[in-house]
Amino acid sequence: MIGNMETYVLQIFNGISVSSILMLAALGLAIIFGLMKIINMAHGELIMIGAYVTFVTQNIFLSYVDKNLFDIYFLLALPAAFIVTAFIGYLLEITIVRHLYGRPLDSLLATWGVSLVLQQLARSIFGAPNVDVRSPQWLNGGMIIFSNLQLPYKRLFIMLLVVLCIGGVYYFLYKTTGGRRIRAVMQNRTMAQSLGINTRKVDAMTFAIGSGLAGIAGCALTLLGSIGPTLGTNYIIDTFMVVVLGGVGTIIGTVVGAGIIGLGNTIFEFFTDASLGKVLVFTVVILFLQWRPQGFFTIKSRSLDE
Amino acid sequence: MIIKYAKKFKGIAGIVAIALTMSLFLVGCGAEKTGGTNGETPSATNTGDTIKVGILHSLSGTMAISEVSVKDAEMMAIEEINASGGVLGKKIEPIVEDGASDWPKFAEKAKKLLQNDQVATVFGCWTSASRKAVLPVFEENNGLLWYPVQYEGMEASPNIFYTGAAPNQQIVPAVEWLLENKSKKFFLLGSDYVFPRTANKIIKAQLAAMGGELIAEEYTPLGHTDYSTVINKIKSTKPDVVFNTLNGDSNVAFFKQLKDAGISAQDLTTLSVSVAEEEIRGIGAENMKGHLVSWNYYQTTDTPENKEFVEKYKEKYGADRVTDDPIEAAYIQVYLWAEAVEKAGSTDVDKVKEAAKGLEFKAPEGLVKIEGENQHLWKPVRIGEVQEDGLIKEIWSTKEAVKPDPYLKSYDWAKGLSN
């Protein structure tokens, strides 16, 4: 592969950007998987819902709000996506997931079923073809570093968003009472229960927050990719890989896992091609998991039932 | 500790294994059921007062994006034919099956339509993978399939009518046009499956013969979402033309990210063969403005038949819907079949095939004709440029319909390709 300085700098930037997208998509999944050991196959569809919320917000702005204010729709779409998907996640938890704790096979199949239902629902409501979300003017173009090197604002924005989300989740988990409860349940459910923590409530809240984060990811992904009923399926495998590689239940694990898969993907892809790049990444991950099945990081605990 | 975790890991692997086995079992059951109920020999002649036809497209799964509209067009044609008296004095009764973007399921549903429902013909499929999956079913049961999508050629089943473009009606003239009007250095970008790989094999042979230069050939998995690396490669290899055979969602990601990288249609010529009006809506016209496509039909195609067709389609399915090449091909193939049946005086597959030879039809794209030799259509070729409103403006066309040549027999450079 011929190339010069700019090509390599841009490629490293691309790697970081892909990592940041994976991080955003996997963050919610990591929290849900970490706390409840629920393999949430519908996570991708929650991402998809976030994307459609953005689409709807855009359309509301196009038809009801002054044209000059159009560009701020995206800033409103972010919290809207979070709230809507968090609510849907909450409903999902109290109606289906709640009854399946401790039954990983059943929950896997049930959430997979939910994902199919949600996909078909999106198809019925919005139609089968992809829809178009126009990105706001201030995110078009890119930062020109030097003549041939341009870093797209959208990718920079997503990186910033990831930093904010991870900061927010960290603050919530480690500095607030609610977060402390979640971590307690994550580490030892029975012990937390006997200390008077309402684990039911914690579960519902965690599931809602994890889902909400998927919504934010969906909103951000409208900037880069397609918005259609199958949007989620394009991301779900990579996000699971991130969670498994990083280790269950830690934020730092998600960050490291996403970093390795994102950078690995882009580097391998650059020197080979996209299909082979993916094969190489998966091979590396599988070999790594043979050696360390628990992933990079785990929560150390003294409980016996682990 | 490690052993314990390994055990747990094994647990998850076990669950996945069980899930897979279960799904295999379910598929097995389904197949058995369709096979088991078929006692009598299949016949395509319909008794009763309706003529049953099958419609077999993906109404769910990743291909639903494209195939739902194609199904809509076929249903519209059937309704129109029924409204004007039907075929052989009987109404057409469509039986719609969902292939669910799953190729084995396509084969299973095809079998069901032919053996259980005994349909006179089937309109269906989109991807080459699904067509290849149902092909043996149609040949074994002597069924009839009408396939409405442009494809990579190198096929002419006696049980299939191909109403989309063969390579010499889309890809080959597009490459020729680019070499003449744009430039020589080609970057081939495609999704990693049968259509792009075969198409690129053809293009490479053509470039070698006509003085073009191949810069690079890149494939990405279907559903690939990040094109920053590919775009970086395009930037550093500086091609004149990107020939795009990406399919599905990937096109959205590619064109959005190309624009963000600061590359517009002025900086780089791209020509796509799987992006039509319907896909442009999802990509966003602002992201694709000025890029080129090659097809046989556009919504803007200027014929009286097309004006009427677009009007009827929009009236039926909504003013925001668009028509495009596969939708048009799906629509006309129902009419072609109906005319062949009228001419044959029967729905018998062999008689219909015989009657279809040389059949002409005034389609929205212009006059088309069924080539008896390979059951493809004579079609005009058009190169277009994407406009601001998402519609496509024709910038070049063959004046006459082009003879279909799926094996590219009339091109010297294509000699070694068909095997």
Image: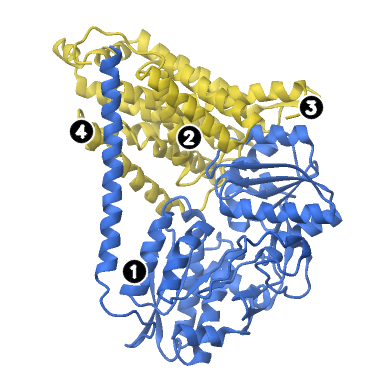
Chain colours: A yellow, B blue
Q: Is residue B29 left or right of residue B223?
A: left
* Badge 2: chain ID: A
Q: Secondary structure at mark 3?
A: loop
Residue underneath mark 3: A148
Q: Is residue A241 visible?
A: yes
Q: Is residue B389 visible?
A: no
- Frontmost residue, A171 versus A231: A231
Mark 4 surroundings within 10 Å by alpha-carbon count, few (fewer than 14), some (14 through 19), many (20 or more):
some
Whether marks 1 and 3 lie on the same chain: no
Report, in whole angstroms, how far the alpha carbon at label 1 lies from the one at label 3: 57 Å
| Residue type of the residue flagged with mark 3 | Asn
Q: Tell me the number on the disc at residue A218.
A: 2
Total number of numbered labels?
4
Residue underneath mark 4: A100
Whether B49 is drawn above or below A89: the answer is below
2 and 3 marks in contact (CB < 8 Å): no
* Badge 3: chain ID: A
- Residue B371 placement (x, y as % from top left): 64, 79
* Badge 1: chain ID: B
| Residue type of the residue flagged with mark 4 | Leu
In terms of sequence position, does the residue under pointer 3 or pointer 4 come before the other? 4
| Residue type of the residue flagged with mark 1 | Lys
Report, in whole angstroms, how far the alpha carbon at label 4 lies from the one at label 2: 26 Å
Tell me what residue is drawn at x 14 percent, y 12 percent.
A194
- Residue B205 placement (x, y as % from top left): 74, 54
- Frontmost residue, A186 versus B172: B172
The quadrant holding residue B231 is: top right
Q: Is residue A96 left or right of residue B284?
A: left
The quadrant holding residue A243 is: top left
Residue underneath mark 1: B112
